[in-house]
Image (cartoon, rainbow, N blue to C red):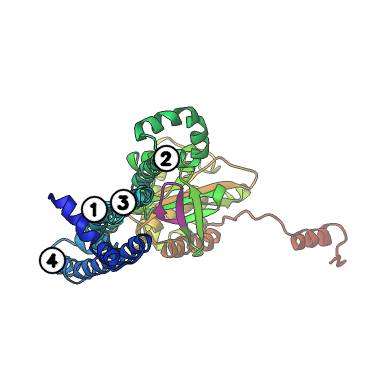
Amino acid sequence: MDIEEGFKNLICLFENFLIDQGVNSTVAIYLNLLLNILILILIIFGVNYLIKNFVIEAFKSFTNKTTTSFDDFLIKTKFPQYIGQILPIYIIYITVPYILFEFPLAIKSFYFVVDIYIILLIVWIIRSILRGTKAYLRTLESFHDKPVESYIQVVMIIVWLFALLFIVAEITGKDVINFIISLGAASAILLLIFKDTILGFVASIQVSVNDIVRIGDWITFSKYGADGTVTEITLATVRVQNFDNTFTSIPTYSLISESFQNWRGMQESPGRRIKRSVFIKQNSVKFITSEDFEKYKKIQLIATYLKDRQDEINEYNTTHEVDTVLPLNGRNQTNLGIFRKYIDTYLNNHSAVHKEMYIIVRHLQPTDHGIPIEILCFSRDKRWENFEYITADIFDHVIAAVSYFDLQLFEAPSGDDLRDYLDKQIIPGTNLK
């Protein structure tokens, strides 16, 4: 007698006993089946208890002694529990066919259910490993700004795709290879259904390979109302936490198909650029007189420059016998030129301005609003709130200093300005307000 025959006899032991006691054979078969199922359930519970209290606990103890944290994340994703189900499933897989050998149709249904569960169990194990890997990689500095979530999602989509193929092949009874071939005709429909997923998959690869966006980058995407820090990059969307603490989701493929602004370069540079203009009235620009010179040289920041520059101009005019009665002749300084030099010196002495980066004070093309004097420099502090304070501090000073150089800022006339003008010019002494 071989082992298989002996095992069947053991399974039927209670059935034979009942028949010997005069019980109807059909009733004996079902009672024997019920008993064997109960015994199998007790065995499975016992095995599960042993696995939970010994094997899994041993695995946890082992992970506590290792130096890597990867196995700790595996425990959090229930990897040991999923692995622990392999032995009970194996026991069921080899035992139930013997229990049901008198029920051929039930055996076929049993194999169908167990095969599908095994497929799902494999998916859960792989998912557990991938989740643990994702959590572990997030603890590494080199992966802190990488779209790990997108890669994990891509792998999981592939895993689920294969799992569904095996499940459908199991249901239909077809071979997996033949089933895949039969799907070729429906590929166009599948491409249409998974259009966004495919676009997201391609986009996430390009975003990562070309280093377009990283987690932690500050981006501005006006079309979607996004202006803040990237907190998550997935296969389908990029999540941005705006500065008002709201969240905006942007389709991943839009990052390669549309234009947006990434402020990473500014964040990685030594300073943050300040670029702003003040507009000077053109009719307030003039050559300086000796009285103006005496007044301006009291301004300490440019006193030395003003004297040296004037000495150079006087020497030139004397050498070339220039008639200085008319300021237009020869060389002469202007209040606007002195003002530009003052701003340049002021910026070079400002503690918050980065001295090793560009400091430029320049004319732009005159407009109907006056002459733009553009200030371009970089603040040492790149934090947004401090950057705004520094910028405001610089321009507060510049605007207040304009009048000391006999210059005027352009400002569009308001309603009160027009009323005052009409009151004085049209009907003097009459109040039109």
Residue beneath disc 1: 94
Marks 2 and 1, how far apart at CA: 47 Å
Q: How crowded is mark 1: few (under 14 residues within 10 Å), some or many (20 or more)?
A: few
Residue at 23%, 63% in the rendered image: 13
Disc 2 target residue = 203
Q: Earlier in the sequence, mark 1 or mark 4?
A: 4
Of labels 1 and 3, the one closer to you: 1
Tell which circle, 4 or 2, labels the residue nearer the N-terminal end.
4
> Mark 2 or mark 3: which is in front?
3
What kind of residue is marked 1?
Ile
State the image coordinates of residue 55 (x, y, percent, origin top left).
17, 66
Considering depth in this image, is 217 or 64 the residue closer to the camera?
Answer: 64
- Amino acid tagged 4: Phe
Quadrant of the image containing the C terminus = bottom right
**Foreground disc of the pair 1, 4:** 1
Element type at marker 1? helix
Residue at which label 4 appears:
62
Q: Give, as a three-letter code, the residue at label 2.
A: Ala
Q: Mark 3 points at which residue?
A: 118
x then y, percent, for residue 193: 52, 39
Left or right of 107? Residue 69 is left
Residue type pointed to by label 3:
Ile
Q: Distance between the residues labelled 4 and 2?
A: 40 Å
How packed is label 2: few (under 14 Cα within 10 Å), some, or many (20 or more)?
A: many
Please state the extent of the stretch shown in magenta in the rendering. Answer: 229-240
Give the quarter of the image for residue 155.
top left
Given this view, does label 4 or label 2 mark the residue nearer the observer? 4
